[in-house]
Image (tube, grey):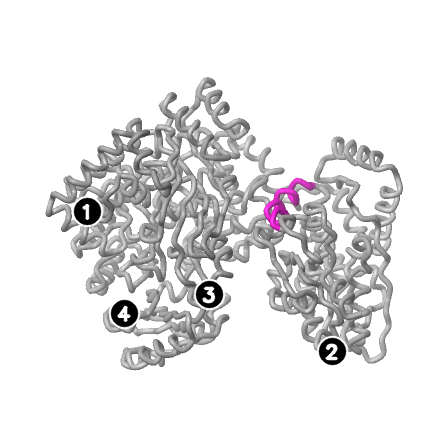
């Protein structure tokens, strides 16, 4: 880490007011990315616009302290780590504008690729690049690494589909390369750069050997060095600069926004997994298979297949395969028209029939089956890495060779693994493009590389270049291959690349050590060590897939950051740095524990299914004193009285002048702590209605109304979801039984989310026997009217035999809605799915009911977990405010006739964020069917 002087810190603060932090917890949580390198920055900077970036670059030049840009943190080659200044551009650079009915799109670097494609989907378009990390990588990284992916090849990668960029050059010049006079502006503002690019263009074009090398290298996917193919493809310096910045890994300029030409999103596809008895047989089949015109051919070796079998979405055929030396090809044909797809498949069938498969080929167009196969493939790297031995670091290499050399390369790699004792290595990748990924597990004690890793790397370089390949096809040169750029391209083109760097960044302020380097061993320095900490932590590969779905990501920390901070604390303790360990531990309580929503959304995105909320619950459990545990244990035994008391407290607070309860809770929080005393705000509802039994002869289902209805009154003008569901059931002729003693029944979530294990055990002892009896030993479904409670009952009743829990929305969609008559529909409805409804797989049921309520149903852009999370929204309202900011902006941008969710606390959180009256979806259904 570079220590910053007071003068440098003052200069940074003047460039980015309020956007500079040197706090250890902030520096270390952002030090980690998906690569196997680790450096600790001296400061983290969060500029808000291009003007602040220009000011930062000016300060960097004056101080001589370089900077590195970081966005999604999914890079694998060490291009987004630094011990100098780290610039976080994900926080603020999130504008996205769809142009020309989706044919073009302008995007800032902090936007996640999946979000761009979601915005383009209504137009039938998408971005060309389709990397496996699309759920987490951002447009900044897509441009910086010249991303491609599984189906785009070299035709639709970033380089080919990019139209223009808004750049901030190291000099501070801001240039829109899409402006009609952009080249003239570049010449006026940067005459040396403009002239130098023209000179290099002629130098490359005038050298036959350079032309030959460039054409051969860029016939494949290639992200080694700078994209010198630009000198053959373009004429004007502004266009040369635009294309050179693509794949430059933040070493030439800052990309403030990018405008892409989009490609059709083929709505029809046929997908299948072709299993061969050996890797050689699979790769040998490639030429014939590629001739059949598939959009994608993905290779999985035997080790990858074994990992794929463990994925929850693997089908019976894959799970039942006795994998020995097998390999598989995941193939897909795509078309925009079903007839055209049928023609493609018909042409491919004779080819598939002639392949030496272990079982007949089966192509499926069924969306769920196709999605499952792609889910397995996209999560493969992280899933493989997550299964590595504790304390080891996962390294993912990425090469490409001509397709005809694929079989020989795979065989030679397997021999390299064996000779260097990398026993658990895995090969997979984009076989159609000759693009292989392979993973090694290595132990970097003290951040040093063992001799076998260095020896393996040298032999691998010789192997790939000997086959006419490239050492980096997709993942960028970074640090890992910077010493080998000269060997791959030769002295002449390497010298051209060095001059490109000097022309754009003469002071060397952008990302030193990345892409081109004079240090022949830079790839062996600053290697990431992974201390053994705890089970929830040790499997994490720091891929960052969890971060876009985390509600606290813009407030404090993400799941990845919670984990890496645990590792940093362990490392500090092991090094004897008690001061750092104590500083990190003190910050961890609020940053990682108290502001975690424990919503479990991280597990839905994590390829190794880590639920960081489980870690947080355990840490919360360790913080509770005896009195707290006893109090909540007592509440579990008298839950009816407890919830009624809480409700009456809300009634009392609501009856007083608002300033009084606000001041009282503010004072109590100051004395007892913000994580112990809820903050009362004047927009909170009053207390709700106690739950009461509802007898039924010959019931069709058992209904367990949520205690949230007792705690909080319905939104103004509403009846509450419990009354709405009973009314809907009555109209449909369905009998619901609410059991005796309902007031004392609970799903246990208030205890489990806080890590109050004693109280949770008390709930578990009391509730399952009651519901087993009420459900006639599981013959009747148990219906819950709050999605979080449905999820809680699922956990609580997991050991209760055949008792089946159904969410009220799903029950309504299947058992009630077909018997109901919709008499008047709303014109439009803003719908907020919850984290629980998402994890429960209720999306289809939710949309079915919503479309019965309204002609237009909109799940707003920016939707995510609201972060209210039971009482988190009361204890830490700043969490909900941060989590809902993007969704609230989308909701308030236009009027809707109705606003709905499926959990009372989420309704409160969204109403607070938007100023609109959110109600349970079933309340609205009850109104339109009345």
Instruction: Give the residues in magenta.
Output: 876-890
Find numbered disc 3 in the image and state the secondary structure of the residue it sits on.
loop
First along the sequence among labels 4 and 3: 4
Residue drawn where x is 78% and y is 34% of the image: 668
Residue 310 circle label: 3
Residue pointed to by mark 1: 488
* Residue that numbered label 2 is attached to: 819
Tell me the crowding category of disc 4: few under 14, some 14 to 19, or many 20 or more residues within 10 angstroms, Cα based.
Answer: some
Task: Please tell me whether mark 4 or mark 3 is closer to you in this view.
Answer: 4
Which residue is at the far top? Answer: 7
Residue 88: x %, y % from top left: 47, 37
Q: Is residue 213 left or right of residue 29?
A: left
- Relative horizontal placement of residue 735, taking residue 861 as reference (left or right): right
Q: Could you say which quadrant of the image residue 817 lies in? A: bottom right
Query: Is residue 243 positioned above or below 840 on the image?
Result: above
Is residue 561 toward the left or the right of residue 905 in the image? left
In the rendered image of this protein, does residue 183 appear above or below residue 355? above
**Few, some or many C-alpha atoms within 10 Å of disc 3 (few <14, some 14-19, many ≥20)?**
some
- Say if mark 2 contacts mark 4, CB within 8 Å: no
Residue 199 covered by magenta stretch:
no
Q: Earlier in the sequence, mark 1 or mark 2?
A: 1
Residue 443 seen by the camera: no
Q: Which residue is mark 4?
A: 290
Measured as percent of width and height from the top left, residue 892 is found at 65, 48
């Amino acid at each position: 880490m570079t220590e910053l002087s007071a003068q440098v810190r003052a200069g940074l603060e003047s460039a980015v007011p309020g956007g500079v932090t040197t706090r250890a917890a902030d520096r270390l949580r952002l030090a980690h990315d998906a690569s196997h390198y680790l450096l600790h920055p001296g400061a983290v900077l969060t500029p808000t616009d291009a003007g602040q970036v220009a000011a930062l670059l000016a300060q960097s030049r004056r101080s001589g302290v370089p900077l590195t840009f970081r966005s999604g943190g999914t890079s694998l080659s060490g291009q987004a780590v630094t011990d100098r200044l780290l610039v976080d551009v994900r926080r603020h650079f999130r504008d996205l504008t769809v142009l020309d009915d989706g044919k073009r799109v302008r995007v800032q670097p902090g936007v996640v690729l999946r979000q761009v494609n979601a915005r383009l989907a209504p137009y039938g378009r998408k971005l060309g690049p389709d990397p496996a990390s699309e759920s987490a990588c951002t447009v900044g990284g897509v441009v910086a690494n010249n991303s491609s992916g599984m189906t785009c090849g070299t035709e639709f990668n970033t380089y080919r589909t990019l139209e223009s960029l808004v750049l901030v050059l190291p000099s501070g010049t801001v240039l829109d390369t899409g402006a009609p006079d952009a080249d003239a502006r570049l010449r006026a503002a940067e005459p040396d750069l403009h002239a130098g690019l023209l000179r290099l263009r002629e130098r490359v074009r005038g050298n036959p050997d350079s032309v030959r090398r460039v054409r051969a290298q860029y016939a494949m996917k290639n992200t080694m060095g700078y994209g010198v193919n630009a000198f053959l493809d373009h004429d004007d310096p502004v266009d040369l600069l635009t294309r050179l910045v693509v794949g430059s890994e933040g070493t030439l300029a800052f990309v403030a926004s990018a405008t892409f030409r989009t490609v059709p999103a083929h709505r029809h596809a046929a997908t299948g997994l072709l299993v061969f008895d050996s890797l050689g047989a699979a790769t040998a089949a490639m030429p014939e298979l590629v001739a059949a015109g598939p959009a994608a051919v993905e290779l999985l070796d035997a080790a990858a297949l074994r990992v794929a079998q463990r994925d929850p979405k693997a089908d019976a055929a894959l799970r039942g395969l006795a994998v020995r030396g097998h390999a598989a090809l995941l193939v897909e044909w795509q078309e925009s028209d079903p007839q055209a797809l049928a023609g493609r498949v018909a042409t491919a069938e004779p080819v598939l029939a002639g392949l030496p498969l272990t079982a007949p080929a089966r192509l499926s167009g069924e969306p769920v089956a196709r999605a499952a196969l792609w889910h397995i493939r996209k999560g493969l790297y992280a899933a493989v890495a997550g299964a590595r031995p504790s304390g080891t670091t996962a390294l993912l290499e990425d090469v490409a060779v001509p397709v005809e050399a694929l079989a020989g390369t795979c065989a030679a790699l397997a021999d390299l693994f064996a000779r260097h004792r990398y026993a658990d290595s895995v090969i997979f990748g984009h076989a159609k493009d000759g693009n292989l990924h392979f993973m090694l597990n290595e132990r970097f004690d003290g951040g040093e590389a063992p001799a076998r890793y260095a020896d393996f790397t040298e032999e691998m370089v010789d192997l790939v270049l000997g086959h006419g390949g490239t050492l980096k096809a997709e993942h960028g040169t970074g640090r890992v291959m910077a010493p080998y750029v000269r060997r791959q391209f030769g002295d002449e083109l390497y010298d051209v690349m060095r001059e490109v760097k000097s022309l754009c960044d003469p002071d060397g302020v952008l990302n030193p050590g990345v892409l081109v380097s004079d240090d022949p061993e830079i790839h062996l320095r600053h290697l990431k060590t992974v201390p053994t900490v705890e089970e929830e932590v040790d499997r994490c590969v720091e891929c960052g897939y969890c971060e876009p779905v985390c509600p606290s990501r813009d407030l404090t920390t993400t799941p990845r950051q919670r984990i890496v901070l645990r590792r940093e604390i362990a490392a500090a303790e092991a090094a004897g740095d008690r001061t750092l360990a104590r500083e990190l531990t003190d910050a961890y309580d609020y940053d990682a524990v108290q502001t975690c929503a424990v919503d479990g959304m991280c597990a839905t995105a994590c390829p190794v299914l880590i639920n960081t909320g489980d870690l947080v619950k355990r840490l919360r459990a360790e913080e509770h004193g005896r009195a707290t545990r006893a109090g909540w244990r007592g509440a579990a035994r008298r839950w009816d009285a407890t919830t009624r008391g809480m409700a009456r407290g809300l009634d009392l607070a609501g009856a007083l002048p608002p300033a009084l309860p606000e001041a009282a809770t503010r004072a109590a929080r100051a004395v007892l702590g913000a994580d112990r005393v809820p903050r009362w705000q004047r927009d909170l509802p009053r207390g709700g209605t106690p739950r009461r039994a509802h007898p039924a002869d010959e019931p069709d289902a058992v209904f367990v109304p949520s205690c949230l209805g007792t705690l909080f009154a319905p939104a103004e003008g509403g009846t509450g979801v419990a009354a709405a569901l009973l009314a809907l059931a009555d109209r449909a002729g369905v009998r619901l039984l609410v059991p005796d003693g309902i007031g004392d029944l609970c799903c246990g979530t208030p205890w489990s989310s806080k890590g109050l294990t004693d109280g949770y055990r008390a709930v578990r002892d009391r509730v399952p026997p009651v519901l087993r009896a009420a459900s006639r030993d599981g013959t009747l479904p148990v219906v819950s009217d709050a999605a979080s409670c449905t999820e809680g009952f699922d956990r609580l009743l997991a050991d209760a035999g055949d008792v089946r829990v159904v969410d009220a929305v799903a029950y309504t969609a299947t058992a009630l809605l077909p018997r109901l008559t919709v008499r008047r529909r709303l014109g439009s409805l803003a719908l907020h799915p919850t984290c629980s409804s998402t994890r429960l797989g209720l999306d289809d049921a939710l949309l079915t009911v919503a479309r019965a309520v309204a002609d237009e149903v909109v799940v707003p852009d920016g939707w995510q977990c609201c972060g209210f999370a039971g009482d988190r929204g009361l204890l830490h309202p700043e969490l909900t405010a941060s989590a809902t900011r993007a969704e609230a902006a989308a909701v308030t941008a236009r009027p809707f006739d109705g606003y709905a969710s499926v959990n009372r606390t989420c309704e409160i959180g969204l109403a607070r964020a938007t100023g609109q009256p959110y109600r349970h979806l079933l309340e609205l259904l009850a109104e339109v069917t009345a």
